[in-house]
Image (cartoon, rainbow, N blue to C red):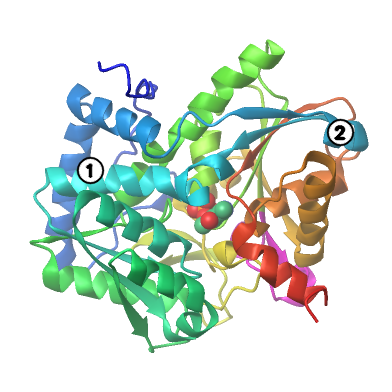
Amino acid sequence: MQPTRGAPVRLGPPGPEPQDLGRFGDFGGRYAPETLVAALEALEREFRAAWHDPAFRDEYGELLATYAGRPTPLTPCHRLSERLGVQVSLKREDLTHTGSHKINNVLGQALLARRMGKRRLIAETGAGQHGVATATAAALFGLDCTVFMGAVDVERQALNVWRMRLLGAEVVPVSSGSATLKDAVNDAMREWVATVTDTHYCLGSAMGPHPFPWMVRELQRVVGDEAREQFRALHGADPDVVVACVGGGSNAIGTFSAFVDTRARLVGVEAGGLGLESGRHGAAVNRGVPGVVHGMRSLFLQDEHGQVLEATSISAGLDYPGVGPEHAMLAARGRAEYHAATDEEALSGFRLLARTEGIVPALEPAHAIGWLEREAGRAVPAGSHVLVTLSGRGDKDAAQVAERSGDLA
Ligand SMILES: *Cc1c(COP(=O)(O)O)cnc(C)c1O
């Protein structure tokens, strides 16, 4: 090992693999057109082999260290803890390259794509965060990159579109359906069917057809594995409560996976939008019903005819009407709890963390902070030790929050 290189991140052992074509209890599976099944089978085989191959793990661990900036610290929050009456520590995914946990997933999938001999990555994106992360990995590996994005989102997220193009990616606006994220997923899957021999579909969360929910969880479990070790070093015990925000569910499942066998309460915080009773939110575990969408059986916001509804949230990263299947299972089994924080509560968490700790969170994990602010001393007893995954930094959201508050008049 050359002394100038960072020590590679030591990955924990692989986690349990879902059986029977990716079943997580009653959820998950592989509901894909015949033309995609062979590609999904090949991906499953390749990922299983790679994930148990010490050479692949070393290379991934080294990339996480030298490129992504891992391990990320665990920050004890003294002033926030005093304010809330519970002991809060933050797992700092906001300090990674590109500013969120998404880099862990895309670096792993890009390595895998290269191992499979693919020369192109495609991805879906809503607000553009996963598109930017994928374009970043593609630039690093010299792969071509095409990102599918709803035409409405292309309008709304001009800066991220520009970033993706700067990184060398092609951005394809999708006009079908509501021209937002769920339509971009459909088009990315369609494109994959047509180009599968030389293209890898780099899916952005722990969702979709098997093997994606399992693979993305495994690529994100480094978040939880590091946090558990760091938390024990800091406090000499596991946390009482582990909290993470849930969009598709990748930062939360990556965190939870290290704690499912502990006595910690696992809490996923969904987008409460304008309130669960308003019907305008993104809380698929709290208010969704089972259905088969985007290649998986899981919980989705649907109308009485089974039509998938649009999600509503102040944070683009939580604006998805479904959730990954492992969360649906953890909820059904009662191993994890899922609550919601409204837009207003997230904004309150956003400001609270900035004022008390000098950390501006992304609006997504601001939901986790906002929920804790509401429940500290109530559902979270005073004095509890709480681990919160801070999935990303708030630079991307600063202008939006300022504008909404009328501060940029
Ligand atoms: C995309 C994103 C999320 C939501 O995605 P998950 O798959 O649920 O983790 C959360 N936080 C940040 C910062 C994001 O960019």
Vertical relation: 320 (above or below) 327: below
Vertical relation: 202 (above or below) 235: below
Q: Is residue 35 visible?
A: yes
Q: Residue at x 62, y 58 (%)?
A: 395
Q: Is residue 307 visible?
A: no
Vertical relation: 332 (above or below) 342: above
Q: Residue at x 47, y 70 (%)?
A: 160
Residue 331: x percent and y percent? 59, 46
Residue 231: x percent and y percent? 64, 20
Q: For the residue with label 2, is its CB less than 8 Å from the closest atom of ligand 1?
A: no
- The residue pinned by badge 2 equals 79
Q: Residue at x 52, y 83 (%)?
A: 305
Place residue 221 in its image quadrant: top left
> Residue 111 has which mark?
1
Q: Which quadrant, please, contains the C terminus?
A: bottom right
Kind of residue indicated by mark 1: Leu
Q: Nearer the viewer, residue 42 or 335?
A: 42
Place residue 79 in its image quadrant: top right
Kind of residue indicated by mark 2: Arg
Asked if the magenta segment contains residue 250, the reply would be no
Q: Nearer the viewer, residue 228 or 285?
A: 228
Q: Which quadrant, please, contains the N terminus?
A: top left
Asked if the magenta segment contains residue 281, the reply would be yes
Q: Is residue 233 left or right of residue 307?
A: right
Magenta residue span: 270-288
Helix, strand or loop at mark 1: helix
Residue 257: x percent and y percent? 50, 32
Between marks 2 and 1 in the image, the one whose residue lies nearer the viewer: 2
